[in-house]
Amino acid sequence: MSHSSQALMAHHVRLHLGGYFSEDIEICPGWRFASSAVVPDIYWNYAYSTSGASMTPEVEESIRTHASRISRSPAWWHPSEPGDHADSLEAWMMLRDLDALREAQTTTSPWRLATSSVANDDVLSVFGDAYGPEGSPDDAGYFELPPAYIDALRDTVPEGGVRVAHTVAYHDGEPVGIASVYQEAEGFAGLYNVGVSHGFRRRGVGSAVSASAVARALDTGATEVILQTPASSPVESLYRALGFERVFCGVLAAL
């Protein structure tokens, strides 16, 4: 099924209300502002168009006014345009090849996989390790996140019938990898929070836990699955091998 960038953004926001996002309100005709009461950075606090309308001085003023009202920096998200800097681009990908996903999911691996509907201590432990201060610039897709992300993940109470399933990979009883699927009641789902502990990277954990999480979502009613990752990165290549295809790139920009 074909989706506009605006439709996919709307799904993304709905999936995370009650978690990373706390509020999503209209700030002017054709524009909404999704924000977090827990995470202060612009990744979870920005305006987006619901109609594909271009930025105007009036819209920018509405964004600045609302951001000031909720004590957040003004920012907006939009599909990439000619001239956007490549480093700022994020690939939005959708699962297209079920055979590739199923093949990856059935590949024998040494990891024991388990699923939880809440972000338990094992989920939080891996997330904190994967996105903590010990990261290496050579680890594609990893960067240090503030503690507020763990708070938001731990305290998530999904809204609107969204279900969350966290898949954890274990090695000798130790949690070493995670992947979360957020799934709407009507079947739309997104893959998020993928992370691998430092000592277990480049050993196939990320692929295994991602494939298992997505396959489980399909088995429980998901009809479409999206994800976001840095464009033209090794991580995008990993997901392409799992059957995902880039549908567009997006830019998150501070005003």
Image (spheres, grey):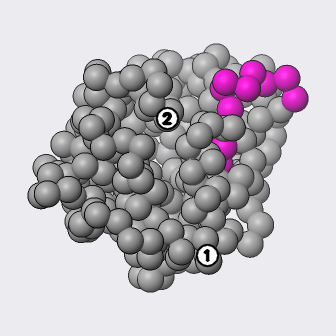
Relative to the observer, which residue lies in front, 66 or 136? 136
Pointer 1 local density, CA inside 10 Å: few below 14, some 14–19, many at least 20: some
Q: Which mark is residue 21?
A: none
Residue 205, position as x, y percentages in the image: 37, 53
**For the N terminus, which image quadrant?**
bottom right
Pointer 2 local density, CA inside 10 Å: few below 14, some 14–19, many at least 20: some
**For the C terminus, which image quadrant?**
top right
What is the magenta range? 82-92
Residue 12, position as x, y percentages in the image: 54, 53
Q: Which mark is residue 98?
A: 1
Residue at (68, 69) in percent of width and height:
96
Return the residue at label 2. 141
Q: CA distance from mark 2 to mark 1?
A: 24 Å
Of the two numbered discs 2 and 1 on the same chain, state the one appearing first in sequence.
1
Residue 237, position as x, y percentages in the image: 63, 48
Describe residue 66's horizontal placement relative to residue 136 as left or right: right
Residue 176, position as x, y percentages in the image: 25, 49
Describe residue 165's horizontal placement relative to residue 181 as left or right: left
Describe residue 190's horizontal placement relative to residue 36 as left or right: right
Residue type, numbered disc 1: Leu
Reply above or below: 42 against 19.
above
- Local secondary structure at mark 1: helix
Reply above or below: 248 against 43.
below
